[in-house]
Image: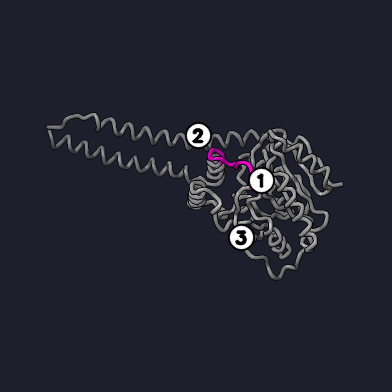
Amino acid sequence: MTRPPSASRSPRRTPRLSVVVPCYNEQEVLPDTAGQLHGLLEELAAAGLCTADSRLWFVDDGSRDATWPMLEELTAAHGNVSAIRLSRNHGHQRALLAGLFTADGDVLISIDADLQDDIKVMAEMLRYYTEGADIVYGVRQSRDADSWFKRWTAQQFYRLMRLMGSDLVYNHADYRLMSRRAVEELKQFGEVNLFLRGIIPALGFTTATVHYDRTERLAGESKYPLRRMIALALNGITSFSVVPLRMITFTGLTIFLLSLFVSAWVIWVRMVSERVVPGWASNLLPIIFLGGIQLLCLGVLGEYLGRIYTEVKRRPRFIIDQVVGTPR
């Protein structure tokens, strides 16, 4: 997956960095998150890894708590903080996309507001960028901070996506660096059903990987409960793989062949034996089996049909209500 930057490429100039942070009901962690990121920008600028006019871009995804008033205060207090308010809750992936498409800068790094991802590796990401990488993935070394159930389901999801033929980075979520060129190319992907973890590897630019240990959430509750995790997994599978449709074809062919064998057996028994007693099981079991298969196939087809339905309407993926703290 990772292609190290070419040694023959000349180092890039010091980039102007924008850190994009999607937020949804994050009033409990926002002060600490903003403080840590603001201090990190100063450290990176002092080390010559980014310019002094680098910025933080917070995206309020229709929060129902005090997240937006707190963001307005942050933008008024700090000249390098901007905030984007979406018209309603559009979902994490769309909020992240809104931030990437609105923020300026030569380089954009996306990170969740809970700061479970190690912000210190941003320095390593920027070094890879100056050496020629257009995309740098933040990859978790372990999932010890997650519950057993979340760790197990995540592992099964990545394995399933690999079987489906999708090119995902294992143990990578949405903590990544993208160059301006990569972001501009991302704008050409017009999917309404967003799964950025699958879209971004499809860009095909030079990539690098940094590893880090994921920590526990600072405060508040996870914004990815089981329901949203399942929805994200369905989006990933149906957006990047037609394997389920092929499985339906294979299942139908298998059942057809089995039915031929069963039909031949019934005819043979009827011809060689006169003591055949009609039984309810021989009628009921095939009906239940075939009915279940048909419902399963209809469900899979319905998922794909639903995705097509939402895509062809071409509705906006996000609507920005307000932007404050824009650079002058």
Position above or below: 216 against 13: above
Whole-Å distance between the Cαs marked 1 and 3? 28 Å
Residue 302: which disc? 2
Whole-Å distance between the Cαs marked 2 and 3? 39 Å
The stretch drawn in magenta includes residue 222 = yes
Q: Which residue is most to the right?
A: 328
**Place of residue 174 in the rendered image (x, y in percent of width and height, measured from the top left):** 63, 50
Kindly identify the residue that appears in the image at 13 percent across and 35 percent down: 273
Kindly identify the residue that appears in the image at 38 percent across and 40 percent down: 252
Mark positioned earlier in the residue sequence (1 or 3):
1
Q: Amino acid at mark 1?
A: Phe
Give, as a single range, the part of the protein colored magenta: 218-228
**Place of residue 5 in the rendered image (x, y in percent of width and height, measured from the top left):** 67, 65
Q: How would you rate the neighbour count of disc 3 (Cα within 10 Å): few for under 14, some for 14-19, many for 20 or more? A: some
Mark positioned earlier in the residue sequence (2 or 1):
1
| Nearer to me, 18 or 78 | 78
Q: For this view, does 229 lie left or right of residue 128?
A: left
Mark positioned earlier in the residue sequence (2 or 3):
3
Q: Quadrant of the N terminus?
A: bottom right
| Nearer to me, 181 or 318 | 318
Viewer-nearest of labels 1 and 3? 3
Q: For this view, does 171 lie left or right of residue 22?
A: left
**Place of residue 37 in the rendered image (x, y in percent of width and height, measured from the top left):** 73, 52
Viewer-nearest of labels 2 and 3? 3
Residue 189: which disc? 1
**Place of residue 102 in the rendered image (x, y in percent of width and height, measured from the top left):** 76, 44
Q: Amino acid at mark 3?
A: His
The stretch drawn in magenta includes residue 20 = no
